[in-house]
Amino acid sequence: MERLQKVIAQAGVCSRRKAEALIARGRVRVNGKVVTEPGTKVSGSDAIEVNGKVLDKEDKVYYLMNKPKGTICSVSDDKERKTVLDYLPKDKRIYPVGRLDFDTSGILLLTNDGEFTNRMIHPRYHVPKTYTINLQGMLTPEDIQRLKTGLKTRDESYQPAKVRILQKDYTRDRMILELTISEGKNHQVKNMMEALGHEVRKLNRKSFGPLSAEGMKPGEYRVLKRHEIRELLRLAAEGEQRREGEER
Ligand code: URA
């Protein structure tokens, strides 16, 4: 059983919040009866109508894109900047799985499957994402240790990260490193580096679980293969089990 607004949103009609408003306004029927209580639980066999139209159980789609720098990860933009959705077919209400900043490039998943999205981005599922960071300044061994054990700042606390130093440029005081994290807090990588006193010059997400966008041009996308979706969901289930084990 799922909450009514979630089912409506997952069918691609509108956002969850708008679905709640439609329910409250009496625009939704379940098995012919008007339901005004958001949160009402429904099952796959219930017939749902929104504004008099029977809910289509939309096929799920999953894309992998190499997000170009200079695009935003939202459905529309009031400043009319290019969004990642401008690159994709427009026949379904798809949205990005989490966000990459305007100036970040790299692997991005997009789907119309809300449950899949939740499993990919919620920290409890521990799906690892690796970023390549072009950093102004050098991390010290103490900085690296803080990242590895779980960086704590005045306002935030981050789970332990994996760190791999790829290059050090002493003349320009820059380094290139890889950081693997399983959370997806807003501007997380930049904030972590800023907390250590450094500015991120360039950021690329290199991998998402076992997947990467290597070899794809900026803006290029492809449909995820079934075994890739299965593997991502398996990773999320494993991550959740591991976490539950650690909490016990
Ligand atoms: N962390 C950031 O700071 N920015 C991104 O785009 C992704 C992770």
Image: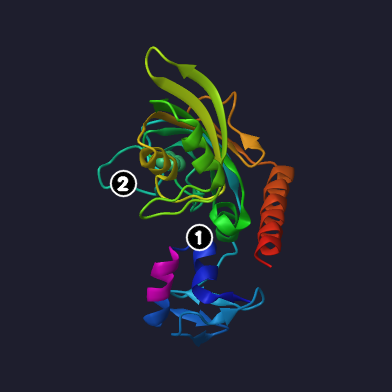
Question: Where is residue 59 drawn, in percent x and y?
Answer: 62, 56
Q: In this view, does 233 lie to the left or right of 165?
A: right
52 left or right of 206 in image: left
Q: In which quarter of the image is residue 209?
A: top right
Mark closest to the chain's N terminus, 2 or 1: 1
Most foreground residue, 207 or 226: 207
CB under 8 Å between discs 2 and 1: no
Is 187 in the magenta? no
How was the colour assigned to the protein in this rendering? rainbow
Left/right placement of residue 230 relative to residue 157 reads right
Q: In this view, does 235 lie above or below 43?
A: above
Badge 1 density bin: few <14, some 14–19, many ≥20, Cα 10 Å? many
Q: What is the secondary structure assignment of the residue under circle 1? A: loop
Which residue sits furthest front? 142
Q: Which residue lies furthest to the bottom in this view?
A: 33
Numbered tag placed on residue 12 in the rendering: 1
Where 61 falls versus 225 (above or below)?
A: below
In the depicted structure, whether residue 214 falls above or below residue 97: above
Is residue 31 among the parts visible in the rendering?
yes
Mark in front: 2 vs 1 = 2
Which residue is depicted at the point 55% across and 46% down? 149
Give the residue drawn at x 54%, y 75%: 3
| Foreground residue among 107 and 159 | 159
Q: Residues within 10 Å of mark 2 (few under 14, many from 20)?
A: few
Q: Where is residue 111 in the image (x, y as percent from the top left)?
A: 55, 50
Q: What residue type is labelled 2?
A: Asp
Q: Which residue is drawn at 56% across and 26% down?
A: 216
Q: Which segment is the magenta one?
A: 15-21
State the residue position of label 2.
77
